[in-house]
Amino acid sequence: MDKRHEGGELQQARERWAEERLGPALKRVSRAPMPSELRHQPLYTPLDDAGRDYQRDLGFPGEYPYTRGVQPSM
């Protein structure tokens, strides 16, 4: 993992982004509640992907395991 991630630099940057950018943006828009039971974060970074093998677990659009769409243009 990149040394910047280990030292908490990315974590601090994500927290600053959430406070300075995301929070004010969400206050400006009304969002209807989603019926889905799936929960997600507003932003994913390499910190959330620790231990993931990019090609095996995520892949490219149009290629197995099709997690990013069945067409290359997705």
Image (cartoon, rainbow, N blue to C red):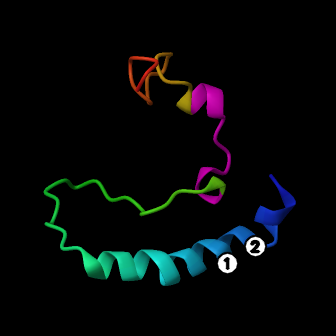
Give the residue drawn at x 65%, y 59%. 47
Residue 14 occupies quadrant? bottom right
Q: Is residue 13 above or below residue 3?
A: below
Q: Position of residue 49 (x, y in %)?
A: 61, 50
Q: Which mark is residue 22?
A: none
Q: Is residue 6 above or below residue 27?
A: above
Report if residue 39 lies within the magenta region: no
Instruction: Look at the numbered disc 1 and give the secondary structure of its residue.
Output: helix
Q: Amino acid at mark 1?
A: Gln
Disc 1 residue crowd, few under 14, some 14–19, many 20+, Cα 10 Å: few
Which image quadrant: the C terminus? top left
Identify the magenta region. 47-57
Q: Which mark is residue 9?
A: 2
Q: Position of residue 5 (x, y in %)?
A: 76, 63
Q: Which residue is mark 1?
A: 12
Disc 2 residue crowd, few under 14, some 14–19, many 20+, Cα 10 Å: few
Q: Position of residue 6 (x, y in %)?
A: 80, 65
Residue 33 occupies quadrant? bottom left
Q: Amino acid at mark 2?
A: Glu
Q: Position of residue 42 (x, y in %)?
A: 42, 63
Give the residue drawn at x 82%, y 64%. 4
Main SS class of the magenta portion in the image: helix
